[in-house]
Image (tube, rainbow, N blue to C red):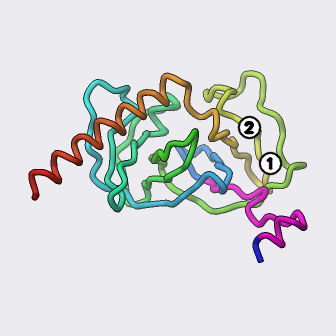
Amino acid sequence: MYEEYLDNGMDTLQNRYLMFELDKEMFGLKICFVKEIVAMQPINPIPETPDFIRGVINLRGKIIPVIDMRLKFGKTPITYTDRTCIVVIEAEQLSVGLIVDRVVEVQTIDDEQIAPPPGMFTEVSHAYLSGIGKMEDRVALLLNCEKLFSENELEEARVSLYAGLKNFETTEEIKN
């Protein structure tokens, strides 16, 4: 059935974005990159990583590096609330958890509602942006998951993942 939708150009994920907030600013991620949304949980810090890499979580036996998007974008850190959650995405063959202030909704944004990134009006680097989504009463910065992290940041996340796996294996050995 799904193949029939794809063959007819009716992909139900096309133009769909997961909308979330950081510091009252709206952001969107293409829904096809989003694997799941989970509540905040204990994060195991990894030494000697950038501040925005908060550590790793054990999500049903899979170790996931976790990035605080507020810190990644140079915003003021806040105390996490019951609305704060982790959006797990698959980017560059790596599952990564993104800590966001709150998830708002899944929104359809058609191509004609998307403007190119502005020249200098945002704190977020243009490499991260795929465009500006124009909705009825607001705009959203649409993030490009494939360019969300630099090569160095991806390497740091992989190092965190490796360190988290080593820690997880040690913990499992101690339990047994």
Q: Which quarter of the figure has residue 106? A: bottom right
Give the residue displayed 73% in from the left and 50% down from the top.
138
Viewer-side residue, 105 vs 46: 46
- Image side of residue 33 versus residue 56, left or right: right
Q: Look at the picture and state if 139 lies above or below 15.
A: above
Give the residue displayed 47% in from the left and 50% down from the top.
101
The amino acid type found where label 1 is placed reads: Lys
Farthest-out residue, bottom: 1
Give the residue displayed 76% in from the left and 54% down from the top.
137
Q: Look at the picture and state if 6 lies above or below 55.
A: below
Sort mark 2 into few (<14), some (14-19) or many (20+) by Cα contacts within 10 Å. many
The amino acid type found where label 2 is placed reads: Ser
- Image side of residue 127 versus residue 109, left or right: left
Viewer-side residue, 162 vs 20: 162
**What range is drawn magenta here?**
3-19
Question: Mark 2 to mark 1: distance in Å?
Answer: 13 Å
User: Which secondary structure lies at badge 1?
Assistant: strand
- Image side of residue 122 versus residue 159, left or right: right
x and y, in percent, of residue 131 in the image: 76, 38
Residue at mark 2: 130
x and y, in percent, of residue 52 in the image: 41, 32
Q: Which quarter of the figure has residue 126? A: top right
User: Which secondary structure lies at badge 2?
Assistant: strand
Q: Which mark is residue 134?
A: 1
